Amino acid sequence: MNFNAVEYFFLVCAVVGGVFVVARIVMQFVGMDDGGQADLDIAGHDVGHHVSSSHSDSDAGFKALSLHGLSSFLLMFGLVGLALYRQSKMGLLIALAGGFAAGSGAVWLIGKMFSMITKLQSSGTIRIDSTVGAEGTVYLKIPPEGSGRVLVRVHNSLREYDAMSSDKKEIPSGTPIRVVWVDGNVLVVEEI
């Protein structure tokens, strides 16, 4: 195959982007992926972007500078540009514009996917105040002047908490209870 300089340019872009895309996929399958954190250090300036729940409000412009975004852009730019220039016999400007549009579309799609994935994340933290009114059972006996342990179902999750009796009476293990209020980190409960 005889390639001219423009075709080599598109081919090199496609190969470089493709190598990084395939490397990222392989790293994810073997467990070497860094969880979406990819940094680039260009001329001593950190222009990377960490995709994590603590940075989900970051500017969308930085997502385009992630390794995922740049490699996807290069891959699509090179493939579409080469196809338009070599196979479809389009001019250089149309091939560049088509490649740029395809690369930009890939970056936009990657950004949307990260945005959707970020929305799926949950901290898993249940505030102790949300236990008020919840029902459960005594796990370890609650003495009249002290605390025991209870199992309470909150937001479809069974949690174990320290608890004390609201009327200062002993509550034996296995007794059904309801949370009346919260005193610090201890639930105040009553028998049902």
Image (cartoon, grey):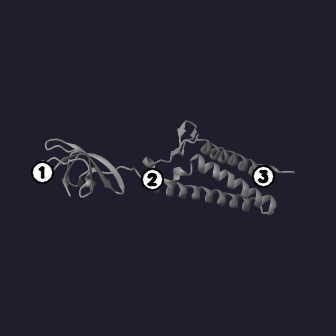
**Which mark lies nearer to you, 1 or 2?**
1
Quadrant in which the C terminus appears: bottom left
Q: Position of residue 190 (x, y in %)?
A: 18, 54
Task: Inspect the image, locate mark 3, and give the three-letter code of the amino acid beneath it.
Answer: Val
**Which mark lies nearer to you, 3 or 2?**
2
Residue at 71% of width from left, 58% of height from top?
96
Q: Nearer the viewer, residue 109 or 73?
A: 109
Q: Nearer the viewer, residue 18 or 43?
A: 18
Inter-mark Cα distance, 3 to 1: 84 Å
N-term-proximal mark, 3 vs 1: 3
Instruction: Please determine whether, in this image, residue 94 is positioned above or below residue 38.
Output: below
Relative horizontal placement of residue 80, taking residue 189 as reference (left or right): right
Mark 2 lies on residue: 121
**CB under 8 Å between discs 3 and 1:** no
Mark 1 lies on residue: 167
N-term-proximal mark, 3 vs 2: 3
Label 2 element class: loop
Relative horizontal placement of residue 166, taking residue 100 as reference (left or right): left
